[in-house]
Image (cartoon, rainbow, N blue to C red):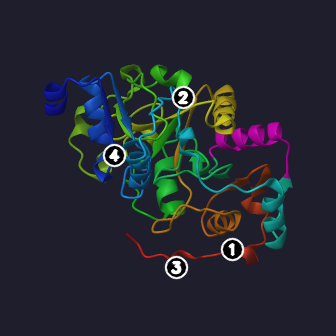
């Protein structure tokens, strides 16, 4: 507020670890102090490397700054990528059972099992740059189920059951579900769910405390609705992630819900998976139902039990 009053600037750009505080970012948005607020997707120490390079380019080398109206960060999908042949080669080496599908088949099969309340490890394209899973190294699930949050936390992430999850939503459907009109591709803003979708608390429920209050259904999408009716939003865009956008669109056709739970593809204490091998190890070491690597579709029930991998002790807990 002080910055907006002192400098009369229209736009605010945030970086540094403090800018990963989605609640604060959401409050800045809500106050309408600025025309636009942009937060660096890797808003921590690692993200400073981009600022350093840009500062040198413009300030030391005196290169002109050309403003690009598109997303120069390309959705933050700037990391490593594996070809279909590399993925297949790794799965064959692992002795994994998998079904090779067409693009259309993989979208439909994944949307179908998600609509049946199954959990999916989703490994696609270039890895995300930054601490957030944005739909390429992700664990995804149906947000409509009251059990999703607890099951993902306890059986897959191996962490406390109260930990919240974020909704990935088709940008074109955003204002039908949330009180927000701004793009949020990097999952860095919190906003409230629309009143018409809330399930009001009874007087008795308001007296509950802690986990007992948390476990009460808050909305039509309870797996991504916090106790205060807020959610940490990721808007999904066709131009930056067409495959994830297509999956959400297909899920929406089946369920009338353009939203999926999106959490990082890893267990507690482990970095986000980077390679097909990492993804398969996490798949076999958790209670994930399905794994989708590129256009390869794997069911847990069809994997050899001898390949089960309890590797949790390899990673220190937080």
Which callout, 1 or 4, points at the residue further toward the start of the chain?
4
Q: Residues within 10 Å of mark 4 (few under 14, many from 20)?
A: some
Q: Residues within 10 Å of mark 2 (few under 14, many from 20)?
A: few
Numbered disc in front, either 1 or 3: 3
Position of residue 85 in the picture relative to residue 15 (left or right): right
Say which element carries label 2. loop
Q: Give the mark count.
A: 4
**Residue behind mark 1:** 308
Asked if residue 298 is positioned above or below residue 15 in the image, the reply reads below
Q: Nearer the viewer, residue 130 or 262?
A: 130
Residue 314 is marked as: 3
Q: Residue at x 67, y 56 (%)?
A: 289
Pointer 2 with pointer 3, Cβ within 8 A: no
Position of residue 276 in the picture relative to residue 167 (left or right): right
Asked if residue 61 is positioned above or below residue 193 in the image, the reply reads below
Residue 15 is marked as: 4
Q: Residue 125 lies in magenta, yes or no?
A: no
Which callout, 2 or 4, points at the residue further toward the start of the chain?
4
Instruction: Give coordinates of residue 106: x percent, y percent.
Output: 78, 43
Mark 1 to mark 3: distance in Å?
15 Å
Say which element carries label 3. helix
**Residue behind mark 2:** 70
Mark 2 to mark 4: distance in Å?
19 Å
Instruction: Give coordinates of residue 21: x percent, y percent.
Output: 31, 46
Quarter of the image containing the N terminus? top left
Q: Which residues are magenta?
A: 100-117
The answer to whether any part of residue 227 appears in the image is: no
Numbered disc in front, either 1 or 4: 4
Quarter of the image containing the C terminus? bottom left
Q: Residues within 10 Å of mark 1 (few under 14, many from 20)?
A: some
Numbered disc in front, either 3 or 4: 4
Pointer 1 with pointer 3, Cβ within 8 A: no
């Amino acid at each position: 507020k002080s910055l907006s009053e002192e400098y009369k600037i229209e736009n605010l750009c945030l970086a540094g670890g403090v800018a990963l505080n989605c609640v604060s970012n959401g409050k800045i948005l809500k106050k309408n102090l600025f025309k636009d607020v942009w937060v660096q997707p890797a808003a921590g120490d690692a993200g400073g490397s981009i600022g350093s390079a840009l500062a040198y380019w413009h300030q030391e080398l005196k290169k002109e700054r050309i403003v690009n109206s598109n997303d120069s960060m390309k959705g933050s999908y700037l990391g490593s990528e594996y070809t279909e042949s590399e993925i297949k080669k790794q799965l064959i080496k692992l002795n994994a059972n998998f079904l090779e599908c067409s693009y259309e088949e993989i979208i439909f099969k994944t949307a179908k099992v998600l609509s049946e309340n199954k959990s999916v490890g989703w490994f696609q394209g270039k890895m995300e740059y930054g601490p957030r899973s944005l739909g390429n190294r992700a664990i995804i699930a149906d947000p409509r189920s009251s059990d999703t949050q607890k099951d993902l936390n306890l059986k897959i992430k191996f962490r406390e059951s109260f930990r919240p999850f974020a909704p990935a939503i088709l940008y074109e459907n955003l204002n039908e579900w949330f009180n927000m009109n701004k793009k949020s591709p990097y999952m860095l803003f919190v906003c409230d769910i629309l009143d018409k979708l809330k399930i009001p608390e009874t007087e008795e429920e308001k007296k509950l405390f802690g986990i007992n209050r948390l476990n009460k259904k808050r909305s039509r999408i309870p797996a991504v609705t916090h106790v205060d009716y807020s959610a940490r939003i990721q808007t999904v865009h066709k131009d930056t992630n067409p495959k994830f956008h297509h999956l959400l669109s297909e899920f929406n056709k089946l369920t009338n819900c353009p939203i999926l739970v999106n959490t990082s593809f890893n267990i507690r204490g482990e970095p986000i998976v980077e390679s097909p091998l990492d993804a398969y190890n996490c798949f076999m070491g958790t209670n994930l139902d399905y794994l989708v690597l590129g256009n390869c579709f794997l069911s847990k029930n069809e994997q050899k039990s001898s390949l089960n991998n309890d590797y949790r002790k390899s990673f220190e807990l937080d």
